[in-house]
Amino acid sequence: MTAVLASEDGGVQRYTKQDLDEMVSQKYKTFCKLKCAQCGKDATKRFSSMMSLVAKNMLDTCWCNECGRVVCEKCRYSHTCEKIDLQKERNAGITKEELARRLEEAEAKKQAVEDAKKDEERAIAEIYERERLERKGKRQLIAKKAKIVEDFLQGISRNTALMEARGTRVRDELFEMYTKSKRLSLTLYNEYEHPTLPGLADDDWKDVKEIYERTTEISGMRAVTEDGPLSMQNPWDPPPEDQTPDTGMQDIGLGRGIL
């Protein structure tokens, strides 16, 4: 125990929070027999009917953290406390002007803390909003490209001459990819309008790119937008390792889907 004994402090026995915690844990009966340092009456007897764990959470009702005294409920807020008395003594000698100045300084510090907190919250909100808008822009772009791929495949599937020239197996594959691209396009558009994922629908976007690559491979055509041939490379993607050489594919403007 590290309590200050009565003989060491003019008849007053003081305790730290650790002292009382240890007494409650190891010598609970002793704790429940402590006397009030102010009036000498029972200070902790009421805890004898409680569990020690409950008593630990109620120590502030029988102990002053300013002076370390154990006190009864009656003396808890009226006992002798050197620290509080010293503060009262100091305050007694303060002029009204000085008190007003201190109050003004305290209020200014409080306001500065509140302003700094608001500025921090505002900065965090702005960062979050920028990130949200950036994600929304990305979702919009891949949804737009997915729609272009869908329209591109639809145009090819309606090209009777091309279908007949490519044969039944290729035609069936193109129809299958068109059905899938239509579903992916709708999914990515819904993610743009009403996101369900924290980021992008990367797996669906990957499927769209694979469908477009396979379509250009077996059709010999590629989609053209207002900005030129459709590029599946997005601004946030890492740069491609090498550039695909011009294969002489036919460019067709079948993919002008705009969100």
Image (cartoon, grey):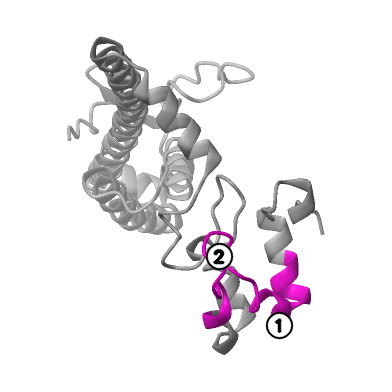
Q: Nearer the viewer, residue 209 or 219?
A: 209
Query: Camera-side residue: 170 or 150?
Result: 150
- Give the position of the N terminus as an image quadrant: bottom right
- Residue type, numbered disc 2: Leu
Mark 2 or 1, closer to the camera: 1
174, 57: nearer the viewer = 57
User: What is the quadrant of residue 23 in the picture?
Assistant: bottom right
Location of residue 206 in the rendering, given as x and y in whole percent from the top left corner: 48, 44
Q: Is residue 140 visible?
A: yes
Report which quarter residue 51 is drawn in: bottom right
Cα separation between marks 2 and 1? 15 Å
Q: Position of residue 203 (x, y in %)?
A: 48, 49
Disc 2 crowd, CA 10 A, few/some/many (<14, 14-19, 20+)? some
Looking at the rendering, the stretch of residues picked out in magenta corresponds to 22-46
The residue that mark 1 highlights is 29
Which is nearer the N-term, disc 2 or disc 1?
1
From this view, report whether residue 220 is shown above or below residue 37: above
Amino acid type, residue under disc 1 in the picture: Lys
Residue at x-position 29% and y-position 13%: 95
Can you say which quadrant of the picture contains the C terminus? top left
Residue at the spot 35% in from the left edge and 27% down from the top edge: 117
Of the numbered discs in the image, which one, if any, rests on residue 59? 2
Up the image or down, 176 lies above or below 206; here it is: below
